[in-house]
Image (cartoon, rainbow, N blue to C red):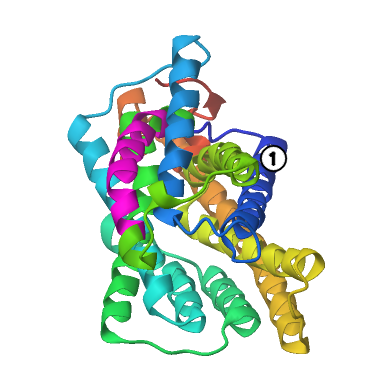
Amino acid sequence: MENPSSSAVPNVGVWAMNVVSSVGIIMANKQLMSSAGYAFSFATTLTGFHFAVTAIVGFVSNASGLSASKPVPLWELLWFSVVANTSITAMNLSLMLNSVGFYQISKLSMIPVVCVMEWIIHGKHYSKEVKVAVVVVVAGVAVSTVTDVKVNGKGFICACFAILCTSMQQISIGSLQKKYSVGSFELLSRTAPIQAFSLLILGPFTDFYLNGKFILNYKFTYGPIIFILLSCCLAVFCNISQYMCIGRFSAVSFQVLGHMKTVCVLILGWLLFDSEMTFKNIMGMALAVIGMIIYSWAVEIEKKKQCNSAAAKVDLAAKTSMTEEEVRLLIKSGEIPTPFKNVEFGQVKNLT
């Protein structure tokens, strides 16, 4: 797992890399896939290309010794890949079958779904400040992006699958890193080949079902090839930064960050593609930014409370002459949070 003692600068760098790469890939894909661009309407297969390039980068990194491949059970990797690929396919189907408004609402619902799933699976609780911040962010993005809302039976089912699988995928990234003590890039390099293989086989048929076109009939020229390569390169940074963000923070924080990217996409669409920017959009974006600021403040407040609680427990351990084994048990049970996992009897010491 990512080192929890990482300084603020690397953390900010990870956030920035995810925002820049995600927004960049959306802009590149808009040019590649739009009818005004190169009309490459094979989203699922393109995602397979993304993971194939990511897998190649991981293989080269491991072969050159820049990174190490730690063991993770194959069944866990296969299960995660199935969930992740189902998420991708269901998202594409949801966008095809539903209106843009309902698609945006389904994406907004991922934050409360992730919160509920983390509460059920990990027993995680959220402070009142965090809940308020999440509501403000969701409301702001809803005002900015949601227009017409139309839904049908098949579209609703696909949206539910997309929400559940995407939420489970993002929670699983953090869980697997913690469970097997693997870094974000190590986990990505293990799952990317499986996802690439399955998406490149099933993707063309999924895309044919979505748009009635087969990728082998598409005329590849220099323009779309360049943008496909650009999209794949940006996807490598996007995938790595996604795993790093969830490994360092949480799935909920990553969802909040995702709405920051939505605001950036709206602004860039207005600047680069002449998209309409109304007063409603501006007010919604302002509300979303305020919510993100509140969320950052709420998370810091929660961290300080955990740190104070941990300090009190460590102090109690010192006063009651608690043994090293008892301190280990407290750390393992989670009663002493991660920021204090190396503190023993009031002294900094590595217990592992």
228 lies left or right of 114: right
The rendered magenta stretch, by its main secondary structure, is classed as helix
Q: Residue at x 59, y 66 (%)?
A: 35
Report which quarter residue 331 is drawn in: top left
Q: Which residue is mark 1?
A: 13
- Residue 316, x across and y down, in percent: 45, 40
From where the camera sits, is residue 20 visible? yes
Q: Residue at x 77, y 80 (%)?
A: 277
* Residue 200 included in the magenta stretch of the image: yes
- Residue 310, x across and y down, in percent: 49, 44
Front residue (pair 56, 247): 56
Q: Amino acid at mark 1?
A: Gly
- Residue 196, x across and y down, in percent: 36, 38
Whether 67 is drawn above or below 206: the answer is above
- In the displayed orientation, state which residue is furthest to the left: 75
Please report the bounds of the magenta region as a residue range: 188-207
23 lies left or right of 311: right
Report which quarter residue 205 is drawn in: bottom left
In the rendered image, the quadrant that contains the C terminus is top left
From where the camera sits, is residue 183 visible? no
- In the displayed orientation, state which residue is furthest to the right: 271
